[in-house]
Image: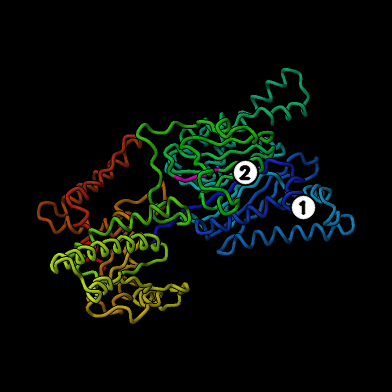
Amino acid sequence: SIPIPMCGIAFLRLLQPLEYYRQKYSTDLYGVEKMYVLMSKLKHRGQDGAGIASVKFDTKEGRGYLSRCRRTGGTAVEDIFGEINDGLQEALKEAGDTAPPRDSGAERTVWLKHNAEFTGEVFLGHLRYGTFGGQSIQQCHPHVRKSNYKTRTLIVAGNFNLTNVDDLFDLLVNIGQHPVEKSDTVTILEKISHFLDVEHDVLYNRYKEDGKTEKEILQLIAKELQLDRVLANAAQDWDGGYAMAAMTGSGDAFVLRDPHGIRPAWYYKDDEILCVCSERCAIQTAFHVPQDDIKEIPPGQALIIKKDGGHERVEDMLKVIRQPPKNGSSSCTFERIYFSKGADGDIYKERKELGKRLIDQILKVLGGADHLGNAVFSYIPNTAETAYIGLVEGMSAVLDELKTKQILAEIQANQGQISEERLQEIMKPQIRADKLANKDTKMRTFITTDEGNSRERMVSHVYDMTYGCVTKDDSLVVIDDSIVRGTTLRVSVLSNLLRLKPRRVVFISSAPLIKYTDCYGIDMAKLGELCAFKAAIQLLKEDPRYGQDFIDKIKQEALEQLRGPREKAVNVVKQIYENFTDEQIAAKVAEQVK
């Protein structure tokens, strides 16, 4: 029942000669080692597969300049870097005594660059969480468009979901292309490649007329290729959320963010490296740098790094590709509530604050602060822990305020006196906070005889419960960070919590009601599966003012929107929610998941 996240990207450009990292860090594989850290710290963003690519600068003809490795499965990152290490050892083994020894310094570094894979200057990694399509290695990024010309070779990886793939597919067909499939990944790759070719041809023809030789022309193209112009043409019709990175075979690179800022992209630059990641804390961990030194790529802009560049100011590398909307950016809220790692300082504070903001609602349900002694607080799943900490801290402050009032009242009633015994009695109560649900392993629910009751029985045993903390007189208050479809809540969570035999269960969410599917940010579910939607529909059916006729009317209006121009479409589904408060919808959700 959790929302399905998309992907993670990690881009790294080394700004110094490879010998520099050998001398300073005593390693020939500085780039590979840092990419391993970055991708490991982004594994939560993609557990279906991963991939990495690297481009080498200034390789001789007949030598490879592009390395790529992709793997599927939950251990894809470990498998990839294990294979990279195996390849390195194999290269050294084949070379035998001709390979420079480990203590030969720069000589060994140069030899490895020309004789081993993944010893380049620029790297691009990707973590895939598949929401659409299959789970084969062909779906794993980075994707490569190969050419014998380095400047036409393109390697792309991204965290994106385009909503107008059909229109973009038709545009490719209309310019004479024959795309092999209709997907946003292929569409983006082919669209950028087309305008890369156009830019390439313009420069080629210009220098050909000037009488330059073929080799001189290719060198000039590599130097003067304007990726911002390529992207401005390629991305003008894209609709969706995207943060994508790419490299050309000649060593140029870019990271582009959508104009709404839906998908995240953070960068850090110093004299040694330029790094871009989907999450700030991955960069902090890999390079041990302060949070404030890591910045966001502004919405609608691309960070463009030329092969002979990277040492200029970041402000000079940022290029506006598409103008953000006048009403500001629309970054994915759920990214910060649920998906990104809570290790990021700002996200940690935000999630704690989300927990604290639930205090008044909880006290209202409990009957006031006087009833905190009969309340046990817990959380589920593990990602809700930060909001839970904020909630417990806030409740502790409420309890402290209650104690202060009791002490002052006692002093006032007893002529300025209070006994030590009475003071200890007032101070004794504490917020009862316990970890009651533990999900240690992933139970395989396919080991069932059918897809009905037996599967639900298996799901109900996913959590191990902590017994002995809750009594029959207690209200059990449990915080979650998202309630999407409500299936896990109904089938597994509530049934397990009720086994603890509390007086009642108060289940709360740090996320707002999820009323719509999200085609731009995180793919959550079909609209009809959202528990908030089902609750609102039921409320309409039960209300004599609306009923099924009102629901059918909205459905017809929605279908009419599909038949009309996309740019003029409006959200008619919001009418379903307009007649009820969030409290009414939440109450109906509670009825439906019992």
Type of amino acid at the residue the image marks with label 2:
Ile
Q: Is residue 451 visible?
A: no
The percent coordinates of residue 514 (x first, y second) are 31, 54
The magenta segment is 263-267
- Residue that label 2 marks: 155
Q: Residues within 10 Å of mark 2 (few under 14, many from 20)?
A: many
The percent coordinates of residue 531 (x first, y second) are 28, 60
The percent coordinates of residue 145 (x first, y second) are 63, 43
Looking at the image, is mark 1 or mark 2 nearer the viewer? 1
Q: Is residue 402 above or below residue 540?
A: below
**Closer to us: 355 or 3:** 355
**Closer to us: 494 or 291:** 291
233 lies left or right of 212: left
For mark 2, give the secondary structure. strand
Residue at (17% x, 68% y) in the render: 410
Q: Is residue 264 magenta?
A: yes
Type of amino acid at the residue the image marks with label 1:
Ala
Instruction: Assign the N terminus to one quadrant of the image.
Output: bottom left
Residue at (79% x, 45% y) in the render: 63
469 lies left or right of 579: right
Q: Is residue 441 above or below residue 534?
A: below
Give the mark nearer the N terminus: 1 vs 2: 1
- Residue that label 1 marks: 116
Instruction: Assign the C terminus to one quadrant of the image.
Output: bottom left
For mark 1, give the secondary structure. loop
* Mark seen at residue 547: none
